Image: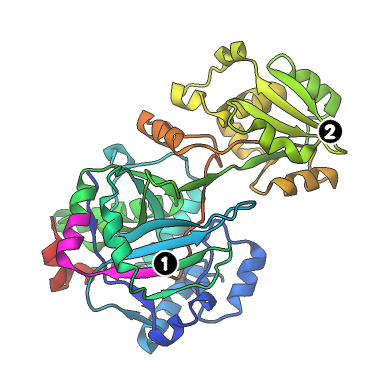
Amino acid sequence: MAEIQPVRGWRYNSELSQQIDAYVSPLFDVVSAKQREALYQNPLNSIHLSVPRGEDAAGAARQRLQEWQQSGVLRQDELPGIYVYYQYFRLPGSTREYCRKGFMCHIRAYDWAENVVLRHENTLPASVNDRAELLSRMEFQTSATHGLYRDDTFELEQYMDEAMQNPLYQTEEDYQGARDVLAVIQDVHIIRRFQQVLEAREVILADGHHRYEGSLTYRQARRLAAGEAYTGEEAWNFHLMYLTNAAADDLRILPTHRLVLQLPEGLSTEELLTRLTPYFTVLTLDDPYGLPERIAGKPWAFGLYLGEGQAYKIRLRPEAHALLDWPTTPEVKNLDLTVLHFFVLEKVLGIVGQEAQRQWAGVAYVRNFPECLTRVDRGEARAAFITNEVTMEEVERVCHSGAVMPPKSTFFYPKTIGGFLFTSIRDSETEHPFYAVFRS
């Protein structure tokens, strides 16, 4: 199954690492324009490598990387290792501190058809090409994608906990309020055990589909260029991934709500409710802020807010589900968000087909529940549909069915951060004598 390899990580030098908060950054697909502008003001922030700007953005990133390596801003560790990465965080309304435990390493960049790395989302070609171009120019990976393996015995956690007794560095608090801690395992025997455990596992890609597919695109181009000289051991066959255990209860998936920014011409909110009635039971509620609690744990149930205090709980009539005729698997058809997209976006609002919905500018995806209500009240949106989170079991069932979820179905929290660890995929990397010990 999954082949992983240790890496000789590139990291900010020991002096800069003492203020690591100043140099880390959000991932390219979640960083806001305001965050980007603030981070660009620091000439050494990792944003300059992960989300470069300018007419030749990838070229600028390559030049900056060379300058940082030559001047010692970034230094490479002497020994290869598995980098343990813990994220401590709290959820709104809870006093419990969670700790998501995982490790970063290189994983072979498997094509989707090989069914070793499994996806649950589709990608946008423009974003994939952007990531592939950056990888081609830099031969450097600036942030880890997030993968999930399942091990109900939790064997690897004991080694990770031990490594965390001597952390390399940590953030005080990243942009999302999490505390990130990095350690390293360089013991050959322990690293081999990590490899053996993953050899028996598939990996579900939780986050980073565009970056992973960018690696696939780049690998395919390099393999074609290599011709008969291709061995399969070249560094560009591998991808930087953060792996966490799907069996852990500290793996959190947060809901992403749907804001309908515009209704079809001539459709009033009263008519919207009328159109919903053949498919959904509609219950009027007094308190819009109680919507998440009223739908919690109930399949095919959603909150609906139409502004001025108009709140409703809607739930699909069981007999209506048979009308869902999209060409997908039963596992996908049973998802709350598939029900929402089919019966609300297609049947009620007339946005027909999954591709049309992906391209429709009339919907926004918002994670913050109070923001949904506020934007409707301000007139920025006509309706908010409040959703439950997707469960890890649902993600696994969909991935193993070979299908994908509706867009923006999962938000694994917290996100990994850029700049905590970098890795190189230049040809010279796997020529280092240490790597011979870890090759399968």
**Type of the residue with mark 2:** Gln
Rendered-image quadrant of the C terminus: bottom left
Left or right side of 430 for 45:
right
**Type of the residue with mark 1:** Thr
Quarter of the image for residue 289 reads: top right
Left or right side of 419 for 347:
right
Which percent across, then down, holds residue 126? 51, 51
Q: For numbered disc 2, what is the local secondary structure? A: loop
Q: Is residue 108 visible?
A: yes
Residue extending furthest toward the top: 319
| Marks 1,2: beta carbons within 8 A | no
Mark 2 highlights which residue? 310
Mark 1 highlights which residue? 142
Rendered-image quadrant of the N terminus: top left
Vertical placement of residue 164 versus 363, above or below: below
| CA separation in Å, label 1 and label 2 | 46 Å
Query: Callout 1: 10 Å neighbours few (<14), some, many (20+)?
Result: many
Quarter of the image for residue 278 reads: top right
Residue occupying image coordinates x 70% and y 45%: 369
Residue occupying image coordinates x 61% and y 79%: 41
Closer to us: 162 or 47: 162
Q: Which residues are magenta?
A: 181-194
Left or right side of 379 for 106:
left
Per the rendering, the mark at residue 437 is none
Which percent across, then down, holds residue 319? 60, 10
Residue occupying image coordinates x 52% and y 70%: 47
> Of the residues under marks 1 and 2, which one precedes in the sequence?
1
